[in-house]
């Protein structure tokens, strides 16, 4: 097929079409694309998904010509993971990342407050294509172990879950399995630890705050998005408790946020999406407070071990990203 001149950092993946749905052919190649245009062809060829700056359209073959029939999906190159993607070709961080970001750039961040009506406070946090509902509920009791041990103050805990349709391949509900998975337990404990680190539990009074983080769409960084969004919901809930005179003093000591960083093809990256995380040599999650203190650092070398210099680069990226997130939290 024929394309216009190349635009750096944007690619097209040829796919087949059947029954109105797209699928990747075995011999698909990644080719550069710069603009949407009808392509004149001498003979019908498989349809193609074309992308530029986050918008995707679906050209449909009609006789010997293609025409554009409108948006197919938004900011997401594929609906399925198992589409034959060659990550080595797809991930090109030497210039621009596949979504047009620079290595040190966050994905678009948005907080929708009071997303649900029944919780004390709720927030839909969106970081690129990752979307998490964070809700705070108030229980005017404390856990039994606090009563048994005569521990003063209140408690903050968290639960984390992911909808089956949040991932390209349906994830089985953990309720069906009859137990929580190890990853879920790890993440919800992380969220609880992070939020308890910035709240004075004695000032909270004899009550427990439940923070539920439910991932409705996952594209990398769900645990860090959960922490960042959960703080916004916690801040809103505490403000309402103060307004209702249920607590006398503000128990929140400072703000908190989290972000993922990593190394992909030797390049340190901020805020990894799913594809970048899959191809990364190093994956790290960093949780920091507004005063620059670390709450948690989780780092793993998936391929080659990393050096002190590389770790310092990733920590600098994390600090930059978290400082930007803390500013967005205030809006």
Image: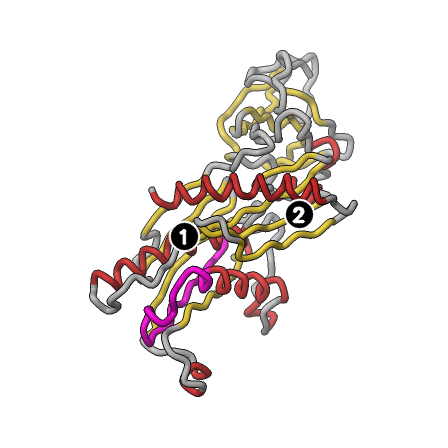
Q: How is the image coloured?
A: secondary structure
Res. 207 visible in picture: yes
- Expressed as whole percent of the image width and height from the top left, the position of residue 1 reads 69, 16
Where is residue 144? Give x, y as percent: 43, 83
Q: Determine the residue positioned at 42% across, 63% down.
A: 211
Q: Quadrant of residue 210?
A: bottom left
Which stretch appears magenta?
Answer: 195-215
Verify whether residue 138 appears in magenta: no
Mark 2: few/some/many CA within 10 Å (<14, 14-19, 20+): many
Q: Is residue 118 visible in this depiction of the protein?
A: no
The alpha-carbon separation of the residues under discs 2 and 1 comes to 24 Å
The structure residue drawn at horizontal position 51% and vertical position 50%, both measured from the top left corner, is 258
Residue 313 as seen in the image, left or right of residue 113: right
| Rendered residue at 57%/34% (across/down) | 104
| Position above or below: 137 against 128 | below
Residue lying at 46% horizontally and 62% vertically, measured from the top left: 197
Q: Is residue 74 above or below residue 311?
A: above
x and y, in percent, of residue 273 in the image: 59, 41
Q: Dividing the picture into quarters, in which one does residue 61 lie?
A: top right
Q: Which residue is mark 2?
A: 283
Quarter assignment of residue 150? bottom left
Earlier-in-chain disc, 2 versus 1: 1
List x then y, in percent, for residue 72.
52, 33
Dot 1: within a 10 Å radius of its alpha carbon, few (fewer than 14), some, or many (20 or more) residues? many
Considering every residue shown, the one lying at the far left of the view is: 244
């Amino acid at each position: 097929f024929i394309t216009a001149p190349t635009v750096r950092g944007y690619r097209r993946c040829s796919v087949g079409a059947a029954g109105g749905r797209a699928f990747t052919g075995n011999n698909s190649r990644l080719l550069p694309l710069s603009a949407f245009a009808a392509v004149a062809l001498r003979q019908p060829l498989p349809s193609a998904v074309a992308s530029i700056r986050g918008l995707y359209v679906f050209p449909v073959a009609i006789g010997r010509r293609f025409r554009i029939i409108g948006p197919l999906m938004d900011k997401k190159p594929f609906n399925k993971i198992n589409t034959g993607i060659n990550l080595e070709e797809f991930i090109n961080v030497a210039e621009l990342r596949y979504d047009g970001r620079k290595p040190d750039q966050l994905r678009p961040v948005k907080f929708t407050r009071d997303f649900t009506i029944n919780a004390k406070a709720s927030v839909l946090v969106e970081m690129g294509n990752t979307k998490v509902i964070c809700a705070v509920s108030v229980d005017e009791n404390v856990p039994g172990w606090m009563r048994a041990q005569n521990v003063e103050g209140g408690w903050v805990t968290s639960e984390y879950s992911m909808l089956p349709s949040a991932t390209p391949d349906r994830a089985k509900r953990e309720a069906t399995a009859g137990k929580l998975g190890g990853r879920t337990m790890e993440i919800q404990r992380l969220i609880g630890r992070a939020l308890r680190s910035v709240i004075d539990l004695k000032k909270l009074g004899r009550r427990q705050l439940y923070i539920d983080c439910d991932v409705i769409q996952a594209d990398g960084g769900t645990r860090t998005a959960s922490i960042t969004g959960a703080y916004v919901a916690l801040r809103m809930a505490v403000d309402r408790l103060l307004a209702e005179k249920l607590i006398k003093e503000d128990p929140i000591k400072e703000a908190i946020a989290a972000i993922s960083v990593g190394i992909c093809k030797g390049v340190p990256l901020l805020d990894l999406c799913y594809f970048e995380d899959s191809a990364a040599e190093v994956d790290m999650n960093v949780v920091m407070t507004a005063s620059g203190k670390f709450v948690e650092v989780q780092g793993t070398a998936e391929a080659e071990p990393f050096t002190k210099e590389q770790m310092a680069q990733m920590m600098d990226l994390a600090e930059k990203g978290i400082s930007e997130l803390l500013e967005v939290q205030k809006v």
